[in-house]
Image (cartoon, helix red, strand yellow):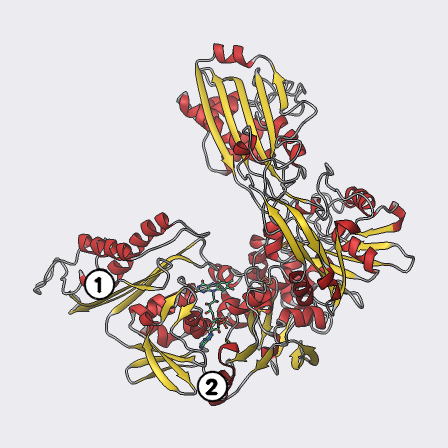
């Protein structure tokens, strides 16, 4: 151990990377391997009235075509398993999978896709989460456009009495903040290679960030016990949360099961950008009750998260955001309502921080606005309100090993900012 | 998939024969940096590819008072050429600021023009410098001013069977300047770009001014109204007679007129509003630098 | 319709059958199993597929395979000489200039192209040299430092 502590350690995979001996999934080529292309919905919302793949199946060079009918198990996956691998009927976003073709090469597979007859009854989509919440809005989902948490249509954080806090405040400060959709854009696009191995197991080379978690979902889709699936992970060319969701393994696996030949399914960069899960967009409304001395004594936050056509990790992202959006402050009265809304857009899911950094961005802007409203430096407001050892957070947890004040002091130092003496004298050990 | 034919002729006459034979079916391939992404993404399904990289059209020469650049000359070569830097500074600068090293080594001047993107970086300096393109086909040769070469996004006066053989840039006495605003410093298409050419008699009276705007209209645009208000103007401290002073106000007037002539659009890179605002500043800066006026 | 394509790959002659629309990236990766150039975008944007053709850096994904007939193509597979790592490879490794490693082959080739022409580049020139290579993991600082170290002669034999 001693030889590592306090020493820079060279990466164990570094030589592989610089010699390009590292093998990524798209680097794998199996003899006789076929290539998959997927037919995706050209419309944002609609119902499939007719789907005929026979002409594609007959095309020379095509080894197989699969649709929702070829899913032996459960045609649903996800942390909340609500998204079909191939949609049998309802289309909830542009780019939703309808059918897949395996052919000798991607050019042939693309040509075969053009031969699939698809008749969709287009319906009016809704893209804006606020419009989606209005009565009479087009229904993205039959059960309604707002996700049901176990606590109802909102994720609730309740601490103290915000109304009392507002009444006692010197100033009320409100603000609305929005963050946009982001794509993870790892350098390696999604890809999967699947084949039936020598022991008749379905083998899949995956870029998954969550092997065991995804393996569970795949067993349900394939209707196979775990010991019949060899799920092989390895080096990933960047994930940033995008590889927390399955994008290719289910399609490749289903195809290999059907045609019993090795297959590769990979996204182009454009497919990757257009159709994979995203960091969902947010709107944050803040209302703070503030004392002239800088103390925030009440904070009300309402958040609206747009999770697209399927849940993905959206509700979980809202959970995490709700817990932390009020910020690392000793605010005695907190009320948070988190709402997760469906729209006709690609599903949103995890991306670096699961909604926490979106909330932090909003909280930081709001706290700066609070400082402005009472004529104080934002540092001052952050220092005064920062959690101290033993404080109680809004979710009733006791803060242990607090270090925010020390971290802020160090950040100021690194940024070349001279803090006033009374802030420098503060400590996380007490108020 | 239909078989795609590929030819890599080594003589110009051979290339022209192939282009005549296949007519509209033929797609000219130079560096491929505009063409191949479209092939990779099935937006373009070529039938016959005629590669023009082996025709010896890769040259930069000076002859008859002109800078002559072969159509298949890579952007990198133009950026690195001392001759271009000296005789056509705006073109050298546009080449230097275009794309990134591995794109510049492949992408060519002919491809940049024939692709007819409204944002093509080499088009504006060539318009400002009064350059022409020489178009050849099996039937013969014609010379067209670069400002008349473009008809719309992706559309030019090129006829089936015709290719750009070279670009001719008249060598003039004045000063040319190219300025580009992108989303980042390198490897970025122009949100707006500007090229100007200004010739000052005795360094004091403007006897020739040309202004071109990129990414501000369906085609790279020459702004004649802006040029008009600069002609004959003299520097404020000049002893020469002149119609008007060439000062900050005049330059701003010219910039305003240039923007008024443009018709930018909103797209993924910027809004029309932003393009107008930024474009005006860029025109003024370029003119000031070329005329030697402080603004 | 397939064409025979012959060229030199890392110093050795190769022949292969290709379609007119196959890119050099398709040829290297899918036909020849030379997988150091990565397919990040097929659109010229990311630089992960950068290789040298007659010593010049190009995007393999934008290069029609048949256009390299008779030319010399170099990839990271050809960087090692006599089993020894190239100075850039050692420097990248020791400067932690590869995180997930997906952009690394393209970065190495861009760096080699730069140093072959300009063995003592300024920091600005290094940044310009790799300006066409995206790294989502954000190793740019380490990549620049690695190239600077090689340029400063720290990785001579
Ligand atoms: C990542 C990236 C960044 C880029 N950045 C920039 C930038 O900053 N600025 C910019 O202006 N451009 C940029 N481009 C676009 C492109 O690189 C240039 O336009 C380049 O000069 C095109 O030349 P080419 O030889 O590659 O053309 P090709 O792709 O070979 O051809 C383009 C078109 O021109 C036709 N053609 C080519 N040569 C001739 C000829 N001699 N006669 C008739 N027709 C011909 C072809 O048939 C085709 O239609 C970028 C491209 C990429 C991929
Ligand atoms: S794959 Fe060639 S530049 Fe991205
Ligand atoms: S190391 Fe991951 S993209 Fe560069």
Residue that carries the numbered disc 2 in the rendered image: B16
Say above or below: B216 vs A157: below
User: Pointer 2 indicates a residue of which chain?
Assistant: B
Residue at 41% from the left image edge and 71% from the top image edge: B113
Disc 2 residue: CB within 8 Å of ligand 1: no
| Image mark for residue B227 | 1
Q: Is residue A198 above or below residue B155?
A: above
Q: Residue at x 56, y 18 (%)?
A: A331
Label 2–label 1 contact, CB within 8 A: no
Mark 1 closeness class: few <14, some 14–19, many ≥20 residues within 10 Å: many
The foreground one among B147 and A375 is B147
Query: Callout 1: helix, strand or loop?
Result: helix
Up-down: is C86 above or below A116?
below
Q: Point out residue A51 in the picture as x, y percentages from the top left corner.
A: 69, 53
> 10 Å neighbourhood of mark 2: few (<14), some, or many (≥20)?
many
Label 2 and label 1 in one chain: yes
Residue C14: horizontal and vertical position, in percent?
Answer: 70, 80
Q: Quadrant of residue A328?
A: top right
Q: Who comes first in sequence, dot 2 or dot 1?
A: 2
Q: Position of residue A252 (x, y in %)?
A: 76, 55
Q: Which mark is residue A212?
A: none
**Residue A23 visible in the picture:** no
On the picture, is A342 further left or further right than B167?
Answer: right
Number of marks in the image?
2
Query: Whereabouts is ligand 3, in terms of quadrant?
Result: bottom right
Q: Quadrant of residue C1?
A: bottom right
Quadrant where the N terminus of chain B is found in the figure: bottom right
**Element marked by disc 2:** helix
Please state if A139 lies on the left or on the right of B104 as rendered: right
Specify the quadrant of the image occupied by residue B208: bottom left
Determine the chain carrying the residue at label 1.
B
Height in image: A216 above or below A384? below
């Amino acid at each position: 151990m001693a030889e590592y502590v306090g020493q820079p350690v060279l990466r164990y995979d570094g030589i592989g990377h610089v010699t390009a001996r590292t093998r990524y999934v798209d680097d794998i080529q199996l003899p006789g391997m076929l290539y998959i292309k997927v037919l995706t919905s050209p419309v944002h919302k609609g119902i499939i009235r007719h789907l005929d793949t026979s002409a594609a199946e007959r095309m020379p060079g095509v080894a197989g075509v699969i649709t929702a009918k070829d899913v032996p198990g459960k045609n649903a996956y996800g942390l909340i398993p609500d998204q079909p691998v191939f949609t049998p009927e309802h289309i909830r976003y542009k780019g939703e999978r309808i059918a897949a073709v395996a052919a000798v090469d991607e050019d042939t597979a693309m040509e075969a896709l053009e031969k699939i007859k698809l008749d969709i009854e287009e319906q009016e989509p809704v893209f804006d989460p606020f419009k989606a919440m209005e009565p009479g809005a087009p229904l993205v989902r039959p059960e309604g456009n707002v996700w049901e948490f176990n606590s109802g249509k909102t994720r609730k954080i309740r601490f103290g009495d915000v109304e009392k806090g507002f009444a006692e405040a010197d100033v009320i400060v409100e603000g609305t903040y929005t963050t946009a959709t982001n794509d993870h854009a790892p350098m390696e696009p999604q890809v999967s290679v699947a084949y039936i191995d020598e022991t008749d197991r379905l083998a899949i080379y995956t870029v998954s960030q969550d092997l065991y978690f995804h393996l569970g979902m795949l067993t349900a889709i394939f209707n196979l016990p775990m010991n019949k699936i060899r799920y092989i992970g390895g080096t990933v060319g960047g994930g940033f949360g995008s590889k927390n969701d399955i994008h290719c393994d289910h399609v490749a696996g289903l195809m290999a099961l059907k045609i019993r030949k090795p297959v590769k399914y990979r996204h182009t960069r454009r497919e990757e950008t257009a159709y994979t899960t995203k960091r969902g967009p947010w709107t944050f409304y803040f209302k703070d009750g503030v004392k002239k001395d800088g103390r925030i004594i009440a904070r009300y936050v309402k958040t609206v998260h747009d999770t697209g056509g399927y849940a993905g990790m959206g509700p979980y992202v809202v959970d995490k955001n709700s817990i932390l959006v009020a910020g690392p402050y000793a605010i005695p009265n907190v009320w948070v309502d988190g709402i997760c809304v469906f729209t006709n857009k690609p599903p949103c899911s995890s991306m670096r921080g699961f909604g926490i950094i979106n909330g932090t961005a909003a909280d930081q802007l709001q706290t700066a606005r609070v400082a402005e409203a009472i004529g104080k430096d934002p540092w001052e407001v952050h220092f005064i309100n920062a959690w101290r050892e033993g404080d109680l957070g809004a979710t009733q947890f006791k803060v242990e090993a607090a270090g925010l004040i020390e971290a802020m002091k160090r950040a100021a130092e690194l940024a070349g900012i001279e803090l006033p003496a009374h802030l420098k004298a503060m400590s996380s050990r007490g108020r | 998939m239909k078989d795609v034919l590929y030819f890599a002729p080594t003589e110009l006459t051979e290339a022209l024969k192939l282009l005549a034979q296949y007519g509209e079916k033929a797609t000219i391939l130079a560096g491929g940096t505009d063409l191949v992404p479209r092939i990779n993404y099935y937006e373009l399904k070529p039938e016959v590819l005629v590669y023009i990289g082996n025709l010896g059209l890769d040259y930069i020469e000076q002859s008859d008072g002109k800078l002559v650049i072969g159509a298949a000359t890579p952007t990198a070569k133009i950026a690195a050429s001392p001759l271009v830097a000296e005789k056509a500074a705006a073109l050298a600068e546009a080449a230097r600021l275009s794309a990134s090293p591995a794109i510049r080594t492949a992408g060519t001047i002919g491809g940049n023009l024939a692709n007819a993107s409204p944002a093509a970086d080499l088009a504006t300096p060539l318009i400002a410098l009064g350059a022409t393109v020489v178009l050849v086909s099996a039937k013969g040769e014609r010379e067209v001013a670069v400002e008349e070469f473009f008809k719309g996004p992706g559309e030019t006066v090129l006829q089936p069977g015709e290719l750009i053989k070279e670009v001719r840039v008249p060598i003039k006495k004045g000063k040319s300047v190219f300025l580009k605003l992108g989303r980042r410093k390198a490897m970025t298409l122009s949100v707006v770009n500007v090229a100007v050419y200004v010739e000052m008699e005795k360094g004091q009276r403007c006897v020739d001014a040309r202004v071109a705007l990129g990414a501000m209209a369906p085609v790279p645009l020459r702004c004649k109204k802006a040029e008009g208000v600069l002609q004959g103007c003299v520097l404020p401290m000049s002893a020469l007679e002149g119609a008007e002073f060439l000062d900050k106000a005049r330059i701003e007037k010219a910039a305003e007129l240039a923007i008024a002539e443009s018709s930018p659009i909103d797209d993924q890179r910027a809004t029309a509003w932003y393009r107008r605002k930024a474009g005006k500043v860029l025109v003024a800066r370029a003119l000031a630098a070329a005329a030697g006026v402080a603004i | 319709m397939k064409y025979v394509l012959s060229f030199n790959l890392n110093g050795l002659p190769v022949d292969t059958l290709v379609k007119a629309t196959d890119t050099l990236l398709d040829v290297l990766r899918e036909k020849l199993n030379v997988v150091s150039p990565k397919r990040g975008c097929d659109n010229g944007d990311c630089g992960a597929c950068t290789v040298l053709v007659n010593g010049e850096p190009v995007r393999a994904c934008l290069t029609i395979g048949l256009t390299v007939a008779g030319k010399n193509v170099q990839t990271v597979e050809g960087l090692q000489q006599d089993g020894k790592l190239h100075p850039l490879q050692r420097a990248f490794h020791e400067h932690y200039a590869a995180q997930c490693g997906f952009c690394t082959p393209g970065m190495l080739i861009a760096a080699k192209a730069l140093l072959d022409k300009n063995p003592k580049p300024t920091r600005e020139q290094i940044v310009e040299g790799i300006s066409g290579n995206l790294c989502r993991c954000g190793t740019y600082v380490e990549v620049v430092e690695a190239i600077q170290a090689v340029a400063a002669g720290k990785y001579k034999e």
